[in-house]
Image (cartoon, grey):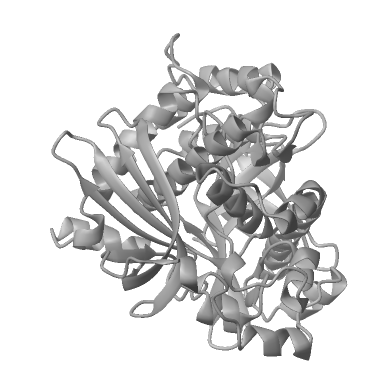
Amino acid sequence: MQPRTSAPAIDFAQLRHDLGIVVDFSREVERQAESVVDRFAADRADRTDLELVTIDPPGSKDLDQALRVVAEPDGGFLVHYAIADVAALVEPDSPIDVESRRRGQTLYFPDGSVPLHPRALSEGLGSLLPDQTRPAVLWTVHVAADGEARSVDVTRASVRSRARLDYAGVMGDLAADRLHPAIAGLPDFGRTRLTWALRRGAVQLDLPDQEIVPHTPGRAWTLRLAPRTPADQWNAQVSLLTGMCAGTAQAEAGVGLLRTLPPAAQESVDDLRRIAQHLQIPWPDDASPGQFLATLRPEAPTTLALMSAGARLMRGSGYLVLDAETADLPVDQRAHAGVGGLYAHVTAPLRRLADRYATEVTLAVTAGREVPDWVAEVLPTLPKIMRGTDSEASTAERKSLALTEAVVLSDQIGARFDAVVLRDRDGRRPAEVLIEEPAIVAACRDAPGAGTRCTVEVMTADPTIPDVMFRAVSGRGGTS
């Protein structure tokens, strides 16, 4: 019998304070955000005729992207992707600009976000909300039937989203044969681009997220698994397509800001192969790690273990400023191994600082213009800013999860749960297991091999550290 799991109140405001995160904006910045105007209105094409929609988690208001994907007669696809034009609303060296460079990106906590820009901009005047005309950077990409991008156009435009959709709703509409016309081609496009990417060595990780969600009215919390839907994957492929087009354009011009990831260390690939052999999961000789992971059954507990090991293939990401010294680096030092090519972050400027600048570079080089001085001056500073804020975001997520896990299990010492082993003990770290209800990933002593189902007992759940430790009490040696 499963124990009843409590979910007491947790003060995430105290966690933000402990992490030194500044939540509020100055009154000057807030006032400016409430009155931003389009600096490039005179140069903007009117594309409010395009039937675009947004796809985001329910309740999202900071809507960076609106899309339209339709099939073409030759078997290819026409993709329109409108990205919020933040640079048009933020004057260089203005109070909003200075503050956004200090923050770097939006930070997410279970009880809300700490935004990159004031909400009047990020959730209001700059957000691609439905039935509102908004300034955007519009990407128009023709994609061939084999998934290759054949032509790319980037321009400033005014757009008007028709609907705000979410992933579960898209899947429901697809099942009921009522998919919105703006995304009629999205499922086939997503599958085509994923196949294309896997041929290039890309790695698609589909681990479910651990979500911290309200357990009861008020400030009580628990954790659940949030599996990724196919709609998540298809929508991500539109963003990846755009980022790869931007990365290619910048690399050809020798100027810009690339998102990079080195090829996976052989040790990580060998570890993944070893776990697959242990679990008796066949790995074809000619399959790349990404192709192998893509064949796994989503519902199998062994898949969770293999995807967790696959995450180690994605270590070492960074940002690279392209200039006279770096533009001629070997491709593997400029590329992003996870997507299988050159790549730049350009699709989330409301939530991530780097995207605003990489977008401006792309607009300039595709039009044959010089990169604006205000962009060129800031580019060299961005890798350090983004490294710092990426670390801050990772810490916020990790500590939010750890605190919630410890609080949720704090009155469950000795309780037993069904679990699956995600990772073997490796000498430096203990084994790691997942229990599904509540959805907790934590260290475990005496665990059997990765992929094994077992019963675990709560040994430690200390919110003051915070720390959770299980001990396996049955299931040693078997696999599922």
x and y, in percent, of residue 419 in the image = 55, 47
- Is residue 318 placed above or below 396 in the rendered structure? above
- Compare residues 428 and 57 and report the one nearer the observer: 57
Is 90 placed left or right of 392 in the picture? left
Report if residue 47 is visible in the image.
yes
The percent coordinates of residue 295 (x first, y second) are: 38, 28
Residue at left offset 64%, top offset 40%: 259
Q: Quadrant of residue 28?
A: bottom right
Q: Residue at x 62, y 58 (%)?
A: 356
Q: Residue at x 65, y 40 (%)?
A: 258
Q: Which quadrant would the C terminus be assigned to in this image? A: top left
Residue 452 can be seen in this image: no
Q: Is residue 309 above or below residue 212?
A: above
Outermost residue to the top:
285
Number of numbered discs on residues = 0
User: Which x, y percent locates residue 91?
Assistant: 68, 72
Nearest the viewer among 463 and 97 is 97
Q: Nearer the viewer, residue 21 or 26?
A: 26
Image position, residue 381 (x, y; %): 81, 51
Residue at 72% of width from left, 76% of height from top? Answer: 96
Relative to 244, is 359 above or below? Answer: below
Tell me which corner region of the image, top left, top right, bottom left or bottom right, holds residue 164: bottom left
Q: Which of the 4 image quarters holds residue 196? A: top left
The vertical placement of 195 against 31, above or below, is: above
Q: Nearer the viewer, residue 475 or 167?
A: 167
